[in-house]
Amino acid sequence: MEAVHSWWVFPGFRLELVASGLHKPVNIAIPPWRDGGPMLYVSELYGSVRYVTHDCKVGTFADGLLNYEPDYVLPGSGESGVTGLCVDPASGDLFASMLYIDDGKPCSRIVRMRTADGMRIDGMEVILDGIPSTFNAHQIQALTIGPDGKLYATLGDGYHEPEAARRDDDLRGKVLRMDLDGSVPDDNPIKGSLVYAKGFRNPFGAAWRRSDGSLYVTDNGMQSYDRIARVEGGGDYGWPPDMKRGSLFWWTFTQAPAALDFAQDGQFGERFNDHLFVALAGPARYKVPSMKGKRIVKLELGKDGGVRSYDDFVVYAGDGLAMPVGLAFGPDGMYFTDLHGEGDVYGRKPGGHVFRVVKAEGGEGPGEGLRY
């Protein structure tokens, strides 16, 4: 691993470069393999899933997943594609969410990719599709498997019809809960429906907190009130018009919160165990310095559900456009993607990275921030 320039890291930690040359890397999934399989998977927005081995070699797990040619305009119609990833811990199969075109219109779908060794696909099936969507990001996003063994998916409101988020007969603007074949569990809040919770605008990230067995999501507002919400089955989270209802935490000014995850296996030591880490992407076209996003923040949650502390943990300190987007904890640290790296948001040249944050010798601070 090589040291990384242009990022400030919380005292007591260091940043390492894991992979480079990725084309708009979005989300990260950590597989159960330790020896002989990949260290992680990463979705590339414009139609691929890549794997990274333990010796940091990059390979292609799946390609050509989109049935249309993206126009690369970001933000805009180039901000949709392949987004969510998660791994079934029992089988090692990979689930991915994405956009596709049906009769000239964008729709959202989930596919299950079966694999025996984690390096190649042995079969792929669509388990959910036909959900009206948009090219403007409000598509299907995060995928995660809960402690109940069910697959959960977050969906944006479709952008053009925000009122869909409150309708029980529409899957947009929802958190969905399904069996691993896409069927409706018998114990869902609405019998015969995949809807688990409603009233979301553009929920990008999702992660489970082991200490309370709950699902947490990020949800992007319009010009204000991005938020984090703890999701309960049958809950209504207020959009439209309310982005505060049911929220655990919100930003008055939009920060574009993307993926989130909890440190739950001692990767950052006892002091930060069970803390929540959130990638704030910020605006795609703004270079640093920027008041918004381009950082990863750390939140300590209280037992009463409130936020006890809030700190910058990783901050982009270069002079480019880098945006943290994907984030996931592995057994040896916290991994994150930076979408287009420091290159042009319109560029067709791969320039994104995967980084890893680990404890430095001595670990956890305190002290002054370090630049690498």
Image: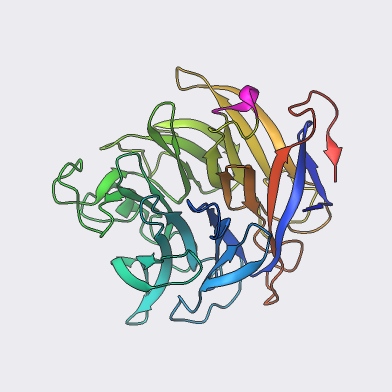
Of 134 and 259, the residue lying toward us: 259
Q: How is the image coloured?
A: rainbow
Q: Which contiguous range is marked in magenta?
A: 269-274
Q: Position of residue 188 (x, y in %)?
A: 20, 43
In this image, 304 relative to 291: left or right?
A: left
Q: Residue furthest top?
A: 304
Instruction: Name which quarter of the figure residue 217 lies in.
Output: top left
Give the residue drawn at x 39%, y 43%. 241
From this view, report whether residue 226 is shown above or below residue 209: below
Give the residue drawn at x 57%, y 34%. 263
Q: Is residue 352 visible?
A: yes
Of 4 and 137, the residue lying toward us: 4
Give the residue drawn at x 76%, y 62%. 342
Q: How many marks?
A: 0
Q: Position of residue 121 (x, y in %)?
A: 43, 72
Instruction: Name which quarter of the figure residue 14 lies in.
Output: top right
In this image, 194 relative to 276: left or right?
A: left
Q: Residue furthest front?
A: 35
